[in-house]
Image: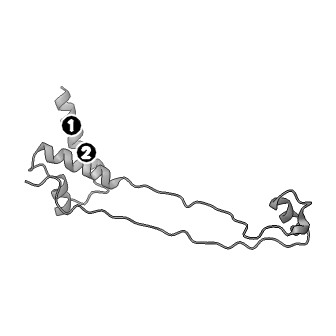
Amino acid sequence: MQTFIGLVALALLPSALAAECAADNCARAVTGTRRGDPFVTQAQSDCSHFQQKTITAPAVTITSTVAPPWYATACSGTVRYASACSCWGITGDAVTVTPTTTITTTLDAVPSFAK
């Protein structure tokens, strides 16, 4: 009975994936079963690792590059000094620095499951 349920689920899997799966030579090379169960297990593991994505949001850093002057000792920190300056309508200009994007691709020179 469990084998039957497994086969039914396996039979329905292609239709569930059809929206994103192009049934081409690449798909046949990756998902084919002619190399046996150990290959399928390894190929599924390889696909799982390949499909994992790490998205790191850029860090937000706000840096005041100029310290308050000596006469602002009555201000209890930079926030208070900035507040005092804003009384004159002087607000801080922001310098936006675009974060860099790094894409790393790793390729194996030798197939991990070659016969």
Instruction: Determine which of the numbered discs, if any, sits on residue 8 in the image.
Output: 1
Most distant residue in the front direction: 70
Residue drawn at 43 percent across, 55 percent down: 54
Label 2 crowd (10 A; few <14 / some 14-19 / many >=20)? few
Task: Provide the secondary structure element on which disc 2 rests.
Answer: helix
Q: Residues within 10 Å of mark 1 (few under 14, many from 20)?
A: few
Location of residue 70 in the rendering, given as x and y in whole percent from the top left corner? 88, 68
Q: N-terminal of the two: label 2 or label 1?
A: 1
> Looking at this view, is 40 or 96 the one in front?
96
Q: Dividing the image into 4 quarters, which one contains the N terminus? A: top left
Q: Residue placed at 40% from the left, 55% from the top?
A: 53
Between 40 and 15, the one nearer to me in the picture: 40
Q: Which coloring applies here?
A: one colour
Q: Quadrant of residue 109?
A: bottom left
Query: Can the viewer see residue 24 in this picture?
Result: no
Direction from residue 74 to residue 68 in the image, left or right: left
Left or right of residue 105, residue 23 in this image: left
Q: Amino acid at mark 2?
A: Leu
Tell me if residue 76 can be seen.
yes
Secondary structure of the residue carrying numbered label 1: helix
Relative to 5, does residue 10 appear above or below in the rendering? below
The residue nearer to you, when weighing 79 against 1, is: 79
Q: Is residue 80 left or right of residue 113?
A: right
Q: Nearer the viewer, residue 38 or 92?
A: 92
- Could you tell me residue 34's position as x and y percent? 8, 50
Residue type at tag 1: Val
Q: Which residue is mark 2?
A: 13
C-alpha distance separating marks 2 and 1: 9 Å
Say whether residue 57 is left or right of residue 17.
right
Residue at point 85%, 69% (across, down): 69
